[in-house]
Image (cartoon, rainbow, N blue to C red):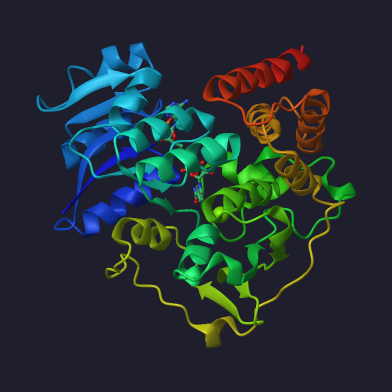
Amino acid sequence: MKHISLLGATGSIGTQTLDVIRKHPSHFKLDSMSVGRNIDLALQQVHEFSPNLLSVQTKEDYDKVIHDVPSQTKVVYGEEGLVEVATDPKSDILVNAVLGSVGLSPTLAAIKERKAIAIANKETLVTAGHLVTSAAKDFGVPLLPVDSEHSAIFQALNGEKRTEIEKLILTASGGSFRDRSRAELENVTVHEALNHPNWSMGAKITIDSATMMNKGLEVIEARWLFDIPYEKIDVVLHKESIIHSMVEYIDGSVIAQLGTPDMRVPIQYALTYPNRLESISNERLNLWEIGTLNFSKLDTERYRCMSFAYEAGKIGGTMPTVLNAANEVAVAYFLDNELSFLQIEQKIEQALERHQAISEPTLKDIIEVDAETRAFIHSSMK
Ligand code: NDP
Ligand code: MG
C-alpha cells in the first residue's frame, strides 16, 4: 500500500490521479491533499477519500470549509499549507499536480523528508531544475515523471547508460492552432485557444500548447529530469499524439513509447514504478484504426516561444525562471482577455531581454527573480 500526498487535487491531473487511486484501493491511499479555490469539488473529494489533511488556498476558504469536513481531516491553508501536505509524515510519495512555480517550495520540502516525487508540475523544474535535481540526488529520492513525453522517455530509457544516448526526441501535437499560419494567429480568441485537438487539460497548459511554450518548458524539464544537454534534445511535430516521445541511441536504434492520449497511464506508471497495474481505461491502442502517423519539422519562426525556451535554457541560471514567470502571468492575462494571443510572446521576450541572468541561483534568488518578473509584467499592463 502506497500512501499519497496530492497537490492540486481539483485540477485536471489531480482528478485523474484520484481516478487511479479509486481504481486501485488496495494499492493506494490518499493521505493528504491540497486544492486552490474549487471548494465544492474539494469537499466532495474529502468526503470520498477521507484524507487526514486538506490544504486550501486562502484563509477565507479555510473559514468556509472548516465546519464541513469530517472530524479526522485537519484543514490548513496558503503556501505553508502546501508544504504541510507535501511533507505529511504518513505519505510515501508526493504527486505534485499543482499549477505554477508555487509548487517549488513544497517539492523541495518533500524531498528533504525523503518522499518520492511524482512530478506533473513542470513549472517547478523549469524555474529551479538545478535545485530540485541536486536535492533529489542528495536525499536519494526518485523524481518520477508524470508529463506524458517524459514518462515515455523514462520508459524508453529503461536504465540505459547516459553515454549511449544520441538524443531525446519529444513529440508535439502542435496545439489548437497547428493548422493556422502566423498571420492567422493575430486575432484568435481564448475560446479557440482552449480547444486542444487531442488532450483535455487545464486552461494554462492548453494555452501553452497553442503557443508551443509547453514544448519549450518540456525541453527544459527533460534537460533536468534526464541530465541531458540541450543540444541533444529535439522536438518533432506529430499530430496524432500516439508516440509520446522517443530516445535515439548512438547505434541508431530509436525506442518509442506509444499509447492513446490518456494522462491516467503516465500518472499510474509514476505511482506503480517499477511495476505496472491494469489501466483504468478500457481503450487500447488500435494502430490499424489510426492507419497513419504523421511527423513534420518544427518551424521556430512560427513558434517563437520554443526558441525563447531553448535560448533561456542554454543561458541557464535565472533565465528559465524569468521565462516561466513571464509566461505564467502573460497567459493569465490572455485568459482574462487582457492580452492578445501574440502579445503573450511579446511580454515574455521583453522580460527576457531586460534580465541579467544570475548563475547558480539560490532558492532566495529564484523566489526574488520570479516575483520581480511577475511585477514587471503587471506594471507593463498599466
Ligand atoms: P489545472 O489548472 O487543471 O489544476 C491546477 C491545480 O492547482 C488545481 O487543483 C488548482 O486549484 C490548483 N492551484 C492553482 N493555483 C494554485 C495556487 N496558487 N495555490 C494552490 N493551488 C493552486 O492544471 P493541470 O492539472 O492541467 O496542470 C497541473 C500541472 O500539471 C501543471 O504544471 C501542468 O503543466 C502539468 N501537466 C498537466 C497535464 C494535463 O494533462 N493537464 C499534462 C502534463 C503536465 P483549484 O482548481 O481548486 O483552484
Ligand atoms: Mg506533455
Instruction: In the rendered view, tell whether residue 95 sits above or below residue 336.
Output: below
What number of labels is visible? 0
Drawn side of residue 264 relative to residue 369, left or right: left
Q: Residue at x 34, y 26 (%)?
A: 83
Q: Residue at x 33, y 62 (%)?
A: 273
Residue 373: x %, y % from top left: 69, 21
Task: Give the quadrant of the N terminus.
Answer: bottom left
Q: Residue at x 53, y 31 (%)?
A: 101
Do we see residue 309 in this rendering?
yes
Residue 175: x %, y % from top left: 67, 55
Residue 55: x %, y % from top left: 30, 25
Drawn side of residue 370 relative to residue 122, left or right: right
Instruction: In the rendered view, tell whether residue 33 sits above or below residue 269.
Output: above
Which quarter is ligand 2 in? Answer: bottom right
Drawn side of residue 178 relative to residue 34, left or right: right
Q: Quadrant of residue 292?
A: bottom right
Q: Residue at x 46, y 47 (%)?
A: 120
Q: Quadrant of residue 98?
A: top left
Q: In the depicted view, which residue is nearer to us: 28 or 339?
A: 28
Task: Give the quadrant of the C terminus.
Answer: top right
Residue that extends furthest to the bottom in the rendered view of this protein: 288
Q: In the depicted view, which residue is nearer to us: 101 or 114?
A: 114
Residue 80: x %, y % from top left: 35, 19
Do we see residue 194 in this rendering?
no
Q: In the depicted view, which residue is nearer to us: 252 or 193?
A: 252
